[in-house]
Image (cartoon, helix red, strand yellow):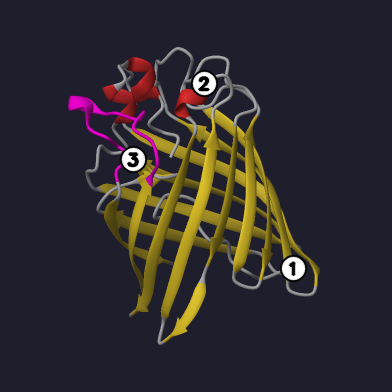
Amino acid sequence: MKLILAAVAIGLTVGAMPVMAEGEHGAALSYNLSVASEYRYRGISQTHTRPALQGGADYEFGHGFYVGAWASSINWVKEAGGGSNVEIDLFGGYKKEIAKDLLLDVGLLSYVYPSNGLKPSANTFEFYGALTFGPLTAKYSQTTGNVFGFENSKSSGYTELSASFDLGGGYSLVPHIGHQSVKNNSKFDYTDYSIGLTKEHNGLLLSGAIIGADTNAYLGTGNKNLAKSSLVLSVKKTF
């Protein structure tokens, strides 16, 4: 049970990695705050299907370089016997148009669970690379050590394809599919999926998405299936 709960953090979030400000030559700082009916990450609920408070800050240095931090309330670590109720993501990278309409994004991302107390630790470090062409983005992420508390799971990877189609009137259709592999723990490999709709309204980004994954291996308290498809709603404000 402890190993299964320690796996909960492998999960599409409704707000996990903030969208960076564009400005290629000038520096830019932005903040974001969101409330979600549930925090899903790569298809798996991080909050036992309960609401989450999330927020972050992004700084773009200009010429494509950026850093940022983002945090969300969670409860999977405590359910696994640890002591953390927050996830903090620290990231930095480089984004540049390398050909007409083709955008490259590479970087590093650290998931930190303060005082999590799990063995192995839930803390996880990944590098990532993504290519965006028009509305389509293909991305690959790989861990440099263990992934989210799994033993002997160095070099686990996540491959994803997502898109954002402008429907007009402030609406966008956002489909996604991804596959998580857990090195030496293939029982916990799975494919996740989502289909979402976003709407910009009075400075807010409103979103709703059906999110789930094709696995029964990620269980919470009471053997609740944390990958079961559900509707996730969120409201986000960027400053």
Is residue 237 found inside the magenta-colored segment of the image? Answer: no
Is there any visible trace of residue 203 in the rendered image? Answer: no
State how many labels appear.
3
Which quadrant of the structure image shows residue 135? bottom right
Q: CA distance from mark 3 to mark 2?
A: 17 Å
Measured as percent of width and height from the top left, residue 225 is found at: 27, 35
Q: Which region is colored magenta? A: 213-228
> Label 1 crowding class (10 Å Cα cut-off): few <14, some 14-19, many 20+?
some
Toward the left, the furthest residue is: 222
Residue that label 1 marks? 102
Residue for point 41% across, 16% down: 118
The quarter of the picture where the C terminus appears is bottom left
Q: Earlier along the polypeptide chain: callout 3 or callout 2?
A: 2
Instruction: State the SS at label 2.
Output: loop
Residue flagged by tag 1: what amino acid is it?
Leu
Measured as percent of width and height from the top left, residue 42 is found at: 45, 44
Instruction: State the SS at label 3.
Output: loop
